[in-house]
Amino acid sequence: MTKPIFLLLLVLLAAACQPQANVVLPAQATASTPVAALPVNVARQAQAPTPVPQAVIDAADAEYLLLANIYERVVPSVVNIDVTINAEDSLLLDSASGSGMVYDDQGHIVTNAHVVQEADSMLVTFHDGSVAEATLVGVDVYSDIAVIRVDVERERLAPVVFGNSNAVRVGERAVAIGNPFGLTSSMTVGIISALGRQLPSAELIGATGGGFSNPSIIQVDTDINPGNSGGPLLNSNGQVIGVNTAIRTETGVFQGVGFAVPAATVQRVVPDLIANGRVEYAWLGISSESVENGFSVAGLAEILDLPVTAGVLISTVSPNSPAAAAGLQGGTRQVLVRDRRICAGGDIIVAINGEYVRTMDELVAYLVANVRPGDSITLLVVRGGETFDVPVNMIARPNDPVTPQCPE
């Protein structure tokens, strides 16, 4: 049975060795480059390309040289914070870690309140590997900022340099240095994704915050993960523009949206924490509709026939508040707008101390950064198509402010 197969194989091999018949070219064709000389022939391929000029390489590497320089200058100021917590009704100890940054040469270190607020002991590890015990100086749950202190030689302290977070623009570089998952001195890079976000910081960390939200939060796409909390967010100059504090996630790890407390808030809060161990904020005593889903003054101006298209439409005025004492008026009726009841008819605040504001977030941000209890401010108010200046004497925020209901 094998012989016919063998003969067939020989026939096929013999046919393959037969010289090819003359090739017939198309009528209009002319002879061209010989096959052996074609550049597709492996043996005749051109030599490998030479490296690009060094100037091109240097230009391409410029950003990485910048990032490396930022890291080398700032990383000595970034610390790892290990905390130990005595679990209630248990002999077991719980532990956690976060990041922090050296604030001054007195041993003060800035971090997040949620990193240290329940700590029974804290150990700070510097970039050079040295370790020091830390004590708590003060905590502000509203901003999620805390200050701790180590007693070490000044030579070991390299304070960070703060930048102007009010000048930050969407699209600018955002660099984070911290200790994600305990991986010390890690650097990640992204951009500023958005500005003016709000975080209910106290609620997020399980503390009493009186319902106040932390304004002017910086949103980034820079990778921030557990352990980055309390570390610096930096600009291209290596200056601190924020403190990394939270992420929005469904998995517990970074999913593209991170948040940082702006440097302006940090610089407002930290001196008070160092001096008094706590922070007091000025309170106006008004409520307003959330600007989400088109319920800002701009989104309501046409529907409610408002005389302006920007500002803070007052929904309610809290009793015994500075706003009530100044004669500000809240809404007088409920109006159904896009299946939602809006408190309409109240005063509209369009400026504070000569600075125009478009939303409640901007008003609160101004109060946080620039006004303290006991200060007097001037509000530019619109009522019934008329404008007038209203002086207001500010007081400290109450722990549980009363927010009245809008009239039916």
Image (cartoon, grey):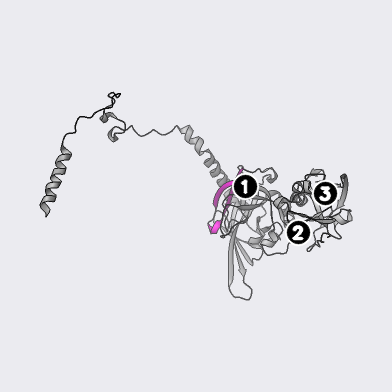
Dot 1 corresponds to which residue? 193
Q: Earlier in the sequence, mark 3 or mark 2?
A: 2
- Could you say where residue 123 lies in the image, as x and y percent from the top left? 60, 62
Q: Answer whether residue 341 is visible to the viewer in this image.
A: yes
Query: Would you identify the image quadrant in which residue 53 lies?
Result: top left
The answer for how far apart the CA atoms under marks 1 and 3 are is: 30 Å
Q: Answer whether residue 371 is visible to the viewer in this image.
A: no
Dot 1 amino acid type: Ser
Dot 2 corresponds to which residue? 276
Dot 3 amino acid type: Ile
Specify the farthest residue to the left.
3
Q: Earlier in the sequence, mark 2 or mark 1?
A: 1
| 312 in relation to 17, above or below | below
Range drawn in magenta: 171-192
Choose between 170 and 134: the one closer to the eye: 170
Q: Crowding near pointer 1: few (<14 within 10 Å), some, many (20+)?
A: many
- Could you say where residue 330 lies in the image, as x and y percent from the top left? 84, 55
Choose between 197 and 137: the one closer to the eye: 197
How many numbered callouts?
A: 3
Specify the farthest residue to the front.
27
Marking on residue 348: 3
Kindly identify the residue that appears in the image at 13 percent across and 43 percent down: 11
Query: Would you identify the image quadrant in which residue 46 lies?
Result: top left
Of circles 1 and 3, the one toward us is 3
